[in-house]
Image (tube, grey):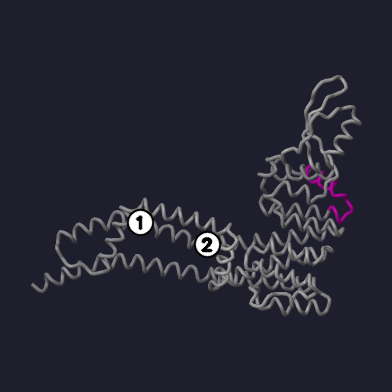
Amino acid sequence: MPAFAATVIDALGRERSGVWDAADATALRARLRAESLWPVRIAGARPDRRFARLSLPTRELVALLHQLELQVLAGVTPDAALAQLATDLPAGPARSLLAHLHREVAQGSPIHVACRACPRIFPAELAAVVAAGEASARLPEALRALAAHLASNEELRRTARRALIYPGIVLTATAGLIVFLLGGVVPRFAEIFSSLHITLPWLTVALIKTSELLRQGWPMLAAVATLAGAALIVATRAPRLRLWRDRLALRLPVLGETFRCLSTARVAAHVRLMHEAGVPLLAALATGAELAGNAAISRDLLAARTGVAAGKTLCDALPSGHHLPNFFVPALRAGETTGQLAAALRHIETYAATRAREQLATALAWLEPVTLTALTAIVGAIALSFFLPLFALLGGVNAR
C-alpha cells in the first residue's frame, strides 16, 4: 500500500508530521479528518532505502519460499504465515524482509507489491511471478516454481564458479609472472644484448619493444583499458549496441549455445508460470521479452507478440531467422496443436536448462587446457627470446 508523508493539525491546534498508509491521497485525507486531524500537506513518502539495499543469499530465499508455500498450502493466510516465519527467524536480513512483507500485507497490499520494495531480493521478474500466482489464486504453485527456478540458477552459478577457480588461479599467477618478466627481467637482458653488439632475432626484438611499451606507456594502456570499460558499459545500455553485442555473443563457439539455452529456459519458465496463472499470452510474452537477458531474443519475442495479436499461433508468429534454439519451434508447435502449451513450455524449460548445463560443462572442460596451452606458449616464447641470442653468441664463439 502506498505511503504518504503528511503534516496535520490536531484537535488542540498542534502541528504534527508523520507517515500514513492509504490507497491514495484522497483516502488519506478522509481518514485523517475522521480522526479529527486537519491535513495541511500530503505528499508521497520516499521509499525506505533500507529495503531497497536489502539483499539475501539465494539459498536462504529458496528456503523461505518453500516454508511460505507449505504454510499457505496448509490453509494459513499469507499475512499470518509471514508473521510466524518472521517470529521464528533470528535477527538478520531474512527477518527484516519477512517483517516488512507482513506489515505491508497486513495493511492490505498484495504480496508482489510489497516484494517490489526489495528489488535486490525480488527483481521485476520474480515479483511478476508472485503477482501471477496471486491473480490466479495459485500462490503455492507460483512459490514452488519460483523456488525451483532460483535453485536451478544458483546450482548453475556454483558449478561455474567451482570450475573457474583453478583456471583463475593459474591465469592470475601467470599474468603476474609475465608482468614481472617484462618489467624487470627483459630490460636487464636488453642491456646485456646491447653491450654485446649482436644481431637479435625478431622474437627478441619484439619482446624488448613490448617491455618498453609496458614500462613507458603504462599510463596510456591504463587509459585505453578505462575507455574500453566505459565503452562496454555504454554497449550494455545503448539499445543498438546491446543488440549487436548480444547477437555476437550467440555466435560464440560453445558459449553462444549456452547463452541461448539459458535465455530460452528463463523465457519458457516465466511465460509458463504466467500462462498457468491465467495471465493472457500477450502479457506473458511481453514479460518474457523483458526477462530474456538477450536483446536479440527479446526482439524475436516482441515480434512474435505482434503476430499473436494479429491472430497467428506463437510458433508461426516467430520471425524467420530467429535466435531461439532449433528445438523451440517443434516443441511449441506440438503444444499449441494439442492445447498443451504449458506442458510444451515446461518441456522446453527443462530441456534448455539441461542443455545449458551440458554446454557449460563442455566450455569449462575446454577452458583449462586452452588456458594452460596459451599461457605456456606465451611463457615459452619469452624464454625462447632469451635463449636465441645466447645460442647465436655461443655459436659465433665456437666458430672462432
- Number of other residues with Cα within 10 Å of mark 1, as a class: few under 14, some 14 to 19, many 20 or more: some
Magenta stretch, overall SS: helix
Residue at numbered disc 1: 179
Figure quadrant of residue 181: bottom left
Q: Is residue 306 left or right of residue 260?
A: right
For the residues carrying marks 1 and 2, which lies nearer the camera in this image?
Answer: 1
Q: Secondary structure at mark 1?
A: helix
Q: Earlier in the sequence, mark 1 or mark 2?
A: 2
Residue at numbered disc 2: 164
Q: How many marks can you see?
A: 2
- Number of other residues with Cα within 10 Å of mark 2, as a class: few under 14, some 14 to 19, many 20 or more: some
Looking at the rendered image, the quarter that the N terminus falls into is: top right
Residue 204 is situated, as x and y percent measured from the top left of the image, at 26, 66
Residue most toward the top? 12
- Give 334 or 92, whichever is nearer the viewer: 334
Q: Is residue 239 left or right of residue 22?
A: left
Amino acid type of the residue that numbered disc 1 sits on in the rendered structure: Val
Residue 12 is situated, as x and y percent measured from the top left of the image, at 86, 19
Q: Image point 71% across, 70% down: which residue?
A: 349
Q: Image point 49% across, 61% down: which residue?
A: 166
Part of the protein shown in magenta: 71-86
Residue 105 is situated, as x and y percent measured from the top left of the image, at 83, 45
Residue most toward the front? 310
- Spatial separation of the CA atoms under disc 1 and disc 2: 22 Å
Amino acid type of the residue that numbered disc 2 sits on in the rendered structure: Leu
Looking at the rendered image, the quarter that the C terminus falls into is: bottom left
